[in-house]
Amino acid sequence: MGARCDAMALCFLAAQAGMALAQPSASSVNWPEKPIRLVVPFAAGGALDVVGRVLGQKLSESLGRQVLIDNRLGAAGNIGAEFVARAPADGYTLLMSSVTSQAISMTLLAKPPYDFVRDYAPVALVGSAPLALIVHASLPVKSVKDFIALARARPGELNYFSSGTGTGTHLGGALFDQMAGVRTTHVPYKGGALGINDLLSGQIHFSFSTIGTAMPYVEAGRIRLLAVGSAKRYSGLPNVPTVAESGVKGFESEQWYGVVAPAGTLAPIVQRLAGELKAATGLSDVRERFLQQGVEPTYLGPEPFGQYIRASVEKFAKIVKAIGLKPE
């Protein structure tokens, strides 16, 4: 009996050892061995695209493998996001996510093509960008108060562009309508860089756009910046008021940018990526490039980023319901 117990114990220990050997460690994962694809689900030239390209360059340098930017635009960022959700979980396909847009999709779409919580491995939150309320220079307004008065006098006549139905720029305009008591018309585009052209020509009257997209035209006098949508003033534009302090109390509209991988990506790969992204967002030249796009470098690692994603999905579900947007 004793010999039999000893044999069983040895078998159990051997099995445990085998299981331990089967679990990969950071040193046993030979990654990366080939180029990495970073999918940006919006058009080139927008803030998310620039942030992705800046980080892609830094990752290429630190990982020793080329990071290729793949712009897969359409359906308010959902085409690129779904592509990554369905990609192999091997660390070679990543998503440069607009967390705001992906969280909104969970509520705004009747049948979302992916689950933002279930289908991704959070890697890192890398930046936040307040949306700016901008208007065409010909519009006879110089403040949020003026703009609200004009919108109330011309219900439904003023239109705004977004980077797609269900994006943060769409929600910013819809939330403003609800909180300011006005009615405007939403015109979706496939990316913010495309919509800004029609705003410049006067076909579009206003937008809640990223600061980086807006500022070159604001400085040229072609569009006017009325306020920023963050809870507090943006550090790069300390003299520009927030929408909330301009009379629409409680208004807040920001974009959040992060990197996620397909669910099931090995933890050592996720941790390696997170560490490299943390180092990159701390570099002075990266911070400068981010701020040029109106993006504040803001880092969260995998676990807190995952908590933030879950909280964002719940938050935007409440907002979408409050402003009466219906799943499509």
Image (cartoon, rainbow, N blue to C red):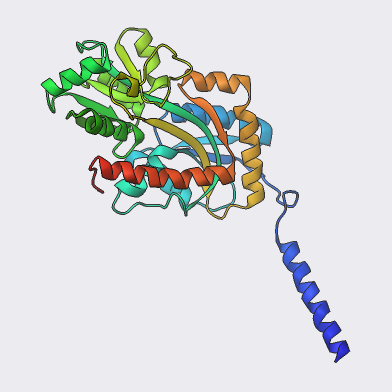
Q: Outermost residue toward the right?
A: 3
Q: Nearer the viewer, residue 55 or 109?
A: 109
Image coordinates of residue 325 in percent, x first then y, are 24, 43
Image label count: 0
Q: Nearer the viewer, residue 132 or 162?
A: 132
Snapshot quadrant of residue 160: top left
In the image, residue 103 sits, relative to residue 221, either above or below, namely below
In the image, residue 184 sits, relative to residue 15, either above or below, namely above
In the image, residue 240 sits, relative to residue 90, either above or below, namely above
- Residue beneath the point at 65% across and 44% down: 271
Image coordinates of residue 292 in percent, x first then y, are 48, 18
Instruction: Name the side, left or right, on which 236 lies relative to 284.
Output: left
Image coordinates of residue 274 in percent, x first then y, are 62, 40
- Residue beneath the point at 42% across and 28% down: 44
Residue 245, visible in the rendered structure = yes
Instruction: Name the side, left or right, on which 276 lies relative to 40.
Output: right
Image coordinates of residue 256 in percent, x first then y, are 45, 34
Instruction: Name the side, left or right, on which 125 lies relative to 17.
Output: left
- Residue beneath the point at 31% across and 27% down: 249
- Residue beneath the point at 47% across and 53% down: 119
In the rendered view of the protein, which quadrant contains the N terminus? bottom right
Residue 92, visible in the rendered structure = no
